[in-house]
Amino acid sequence: LKERNARAIWHPMAHPADSQKNPPEIIVGGDGVSITDIDGHTTVDGVGGLWNVNLGFSCQPVKDAIAAQLERLPYYSIFRGTTNDLVIELGDMLAEFFAEDGLERAFYTSGGSDSVEIALRLARQYHKIRGEAGRVKYLSLKKGYHGTHTLGASVNGNANFRTQYEPLMPGCYHIPAPYPYRNPFNESDPEKLAQLCLAALEDEIKFQGAETIAAMIMEPILGAGGVIVPHASFMPGVRAICDKYGILLVADEVITAFGRTGAWSGSRLWGVQPDLMTTAKAITNGYFPFGAVMISGKVAEVFESDTSGKGAIGSGYTYSGHPVGAAAAIACLKETQRLQVKDNAAARGAQLFAGLQALQEKYDIVGDVRGGHGLMCALELVSDRTSKTPIDKATIAKIYRGAYEAGTMVRVSGNNVILSPSLIISEDNIATILAGLDTGLSQV
Ligand code: PMP
């Protein structure tokens, strides 16, 4: 199978030859918070699938809902003229779930990249309807990750995901992220750094001309960029600047929505109401490709009261509002609330963060530990703490392998080890993750 994999498949975010050099594990089973490979080796999944399997791999109500819906109506589109009962029920549930975030409507997508694409398009359209067609540019954070479609890739803060495809969308500008460990201001105090980044944002807006900017997109906690947690003043500061200049704020909550940060949304964690919110991943817990863009009352009102025809939405997917996906999402949302998973995320997240800090004391190679808000943590590995030189690929691969053999699956991204297990994880399983990582680190 590994040979055939190398011959037949190109993997996302990898060089096509990588699977020959380093054959990937073949995962054949998932149970609770653990996965099993084809050799029968079971590991606690420290990654929670890909930050999405919040309820674990054995969530029976979700499996039942999917099976029942497949029997009843496996597919029908919600393009003009038809809808289905599932998407209506889910729409009501999402509006209630995100009411505190000021979000009232759902636009369904097939995943995170789609959600980003739609949100950024809606932002431009919002301005067009209001007679400000010149607002076409986008702002985002360096280190931010917003998926792989052309708009999302253009606002991605990490050049590694952009350069292969440039020229991408013109008019996308990247603002320094509030990343205390490394930043152009050499500022390690998170609050002062937040202020400097906010000033940089405002400078960019003035330089570009506010009347040319449609939206600012940001993750409340930056995920794929290495779990960068902004100071609590940062997102409220972004909100205030967006309001001052008439720019829409898009919260990219593909990772952070539904409890991962210990709050029901990342925006709520910082007390901010975004204009648009992207969701995907945990909306169906990984069991079905699905997503939703949540739309605030302020934005909905502009579209819905339009009489000129400019409010007609020109975007949508064959799988927008897929009934099986909607059935999965309804079951997930019910389980998410029944289990109040945000509370376990907060408690187990604190345990994980403290354990990672202990590893930093034990190993010089651990340059920075990030997290502290739910089950989103990262270790940044360096060959030297003073120069902060990123650890090389071979060393981090050894750590990954050592942890895997010791019973822990972690995610490696650049010189970061990222941890984002399921939100239903137990204290013992967090201890297993930490022990596995300790073993991996001890081998280098
Ligand atoms: N936005 C964010 C914040 C993400 O983390 C991701 C995926 N990791 C995406 C968008 C893209 O989502 P998808 O992979 O489902 O297209």
Image (tube, rainbow, N blue to C red):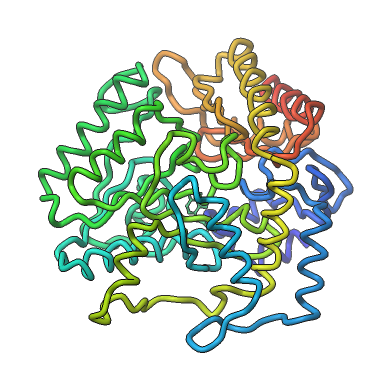
Image side of residue 165 versus residue 316, left or right:
left
Image location of residue 422, percent across then percent down: 70, 42
Left or right of 351 in this view: 109: left
Rendering coords of residue 96 (x, y %): 56, 54
Q: Position of residue 139 (x, y in %)?
A: 27, 49
| Extreme-top residue of the structure | 361
Above-or-below relation of 429 to 83: above
Measured along the vertical axis of the image, is residue 305 above or below residue 443?
below
Image quadrant holding the N terminus, namely bottom right
Q: Nearer the viewer, residue 126 or 434?
A: 126
Q: Is residue 32 above or below residue 374?
A: below
Quarter of the image that includes the C terminus: top right
Any part of residue 221 in sight = yes
**Total labels drawn:** 0
The percent coordinates of residue 128 (x first, y second) are 21, 69
Q: Residue furthest right?
A: 40
Horizontal placement of 170 versus 331: left or right? left
Q: Nearer the viewer, residue 133 or 386?
A: 133
In the figure, residue 442 lies in which quadrant? Answer: top right
The answer to whether 244 is drawn above or below residue 441 in the figure is below
**Residue visible at 50% across and 83% down in the picture:** 79
- Evaluate whether residue 394 shows in this view: no
User: At x 74% / y 50%, what residue is drawn?
Assistant: 335
